[in-house]
Image (cartoon, rainbow, N blue to C red):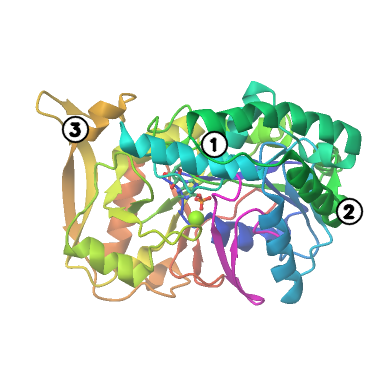
Amino acid sequence: MPAYPVIGGQWGDEGKGKVVDFLAKNSDCIVRFAGGSNAGHTVINDSGEFRLHLVPSGIFASQASSIIGNGMVVDPDVLLEELAELTNRGVDTQRLYVSQRAHLIMPYHILLDQLEEERRSQGAGAIGTTGRGVGPAYTDKTSRVGVRVGDLLDKDNLKARLTQAMELKNKMITRVYEGEAISVDEVYDRCLTWRDKLEGHITDTEGIIQDTLGEGGKVLLEGAQGTLLDLDHGTYPYVTSSWPSVGGACIGMGVSPNYIREITGIFKAYCTRVGRGPMPTEMLDATEELLREKAGEYGATTGRPRRLGWFDAVAGRYSVGLNGFSSLVLTRLDILDGLPSVKICVGYRTMERELDRFPADTLLLERCEPIYEEMSGWDIPTAGSTQISELPQEAVAYLKRIEELVGCSFSMVSTGPKREETIVLKQLGSDGL
Ligand code: IMO
Ligand code: MG
């Protein structure tokens, strides 16, 4: 009966793909509910190593359905490429369903994303989006000129919707941004190709999820992005255009909050951020370089180097409060192996005052200096550990201190990218998800 959300607690890239893959074996349905191909979820399991942008990381669980929920924006070219790769590598994708209500990312959205970023970079500054057309597609959704996945199935309606939307888009592209107009007919033809290839996957996914829950099945909700990129609760305007925090899950898949059970927050043992916007604990030193190379902290979607910072417990506590996490998963602990000391940010300081809460004012956050607590590092590697008893006591002390500071305890600790490199402290779900 329950739905278990897995939510990014920081600025994305926390390791949600690995955790969902780990939990998927006992689920009946795995659902992505927000974002689009701006996400990059890495999964390493018996089938190989995969980078998924749209397909849920539970696709490897053959007993479960995988769902691209109504809250997502879908670029069919990316989806088809992903499906082809999975199929070529022997993964069954027949049980992948796409909501009729999800919105399409069109070629003009991708162009507008890039043009708008260029424009911003000449003025107040670019956001550093992934350039996948995600923001413009959500903008059209709320302006009620979006084209939905279900529209692909009705040729006449599709043509009418495209014509209506593209008249305005082409005026923007040519008159505001001085770009080149996109042909309606070309986009329409592309839509028909998408329809031919995807028709078998497009359905009323909200019904499938509700039936699964009604029949006592378990639904795993795979968050994308992270709480601090949330359109409302993140570091606006340096955010994404959807709601990655748990509040977005019910709307983004079409299910009542009554079904939501244990909410799991995923945190990296340090912070990372791609794109612009404040990150108070950003290292900007040799340790950042060292850890970036060791961990391969480059964007799975864009290849951009990620910015690295120490664990920010002020932001962590904010994220715990906002999502009501019942437990946390700490990932990439092994990356901190061998450092002489590790730091945790326990407060912020500005010229005028000290803060122990994550501020709503992004300009204020930009001026915040972190107040650190420094702890001993550890020489004995945690990499590959599967039991808490294998961890050096300094690493255990680090975990305990984070738990105290953010006000929530760990149910899992990840000590490497592979599925088995995981310490389970508490089974999720009383019935053992
Ligand atoms: P996963 O699911 C990290 C960031 C972008 C940019 C901002 C807005 O892999 O954790 P957008 O293209 O969404 O309009 O860009 O959001 N961003 C992510 N950062 N992980 C992600 O997803 C992200 N999805 C978007 O870098 O700063
Ligand atoms: Mg990612």
Q: Quadrant of the C terminus?
A: bottom right
| Depicted 307 relative to depicted 2: above or below | below
* Badge 1 element: helix
What residue is pinned by disc 1? 135
Task: Look at the picture and state if 327 lies above or below 26.
Answer: above
- Nearest to N terminus: mark 1 or mark 2: 1
User: Can you tell which of label 1 and label 3 is closer to the viewer?
Assistant: 1
Check disc 1 and give the amino acid type. Answer: Gly
Does 105 lie within the magenta span? Answer: no
Circle 3 residue: 367
Q: Name the mark on residue 321.
A: none
Left or right placement of residue 143 versus residue 290 in this view: right
Q: Is mark 3 within 8 Å of ligand 1?
A: no
- Residue 50 lies in the magenta-colored region: yes
Q: CA distance from mark 1 to mark 2?
A: 27 Å
The answer to whether the residue bearing label 1 lies less than 8 angstroms from the nearest atom of ligand 1 is: yes
* Rendered location of residue 47, percent (x, y): 67, 76
- Of the numbered discs 2 and 3, the one sitting upstream in the chain is 2
What range of the chain is rendered magenta? Answer: 34-59
Q: Is residue 289 above or below residue 277?
A: below
Residue 25 visible in this rendered orientation of the protein? no
The one nearer the camera, 261 or 301, is: 301
Identify which residue, 17 or 412, lies in the foreground.
17
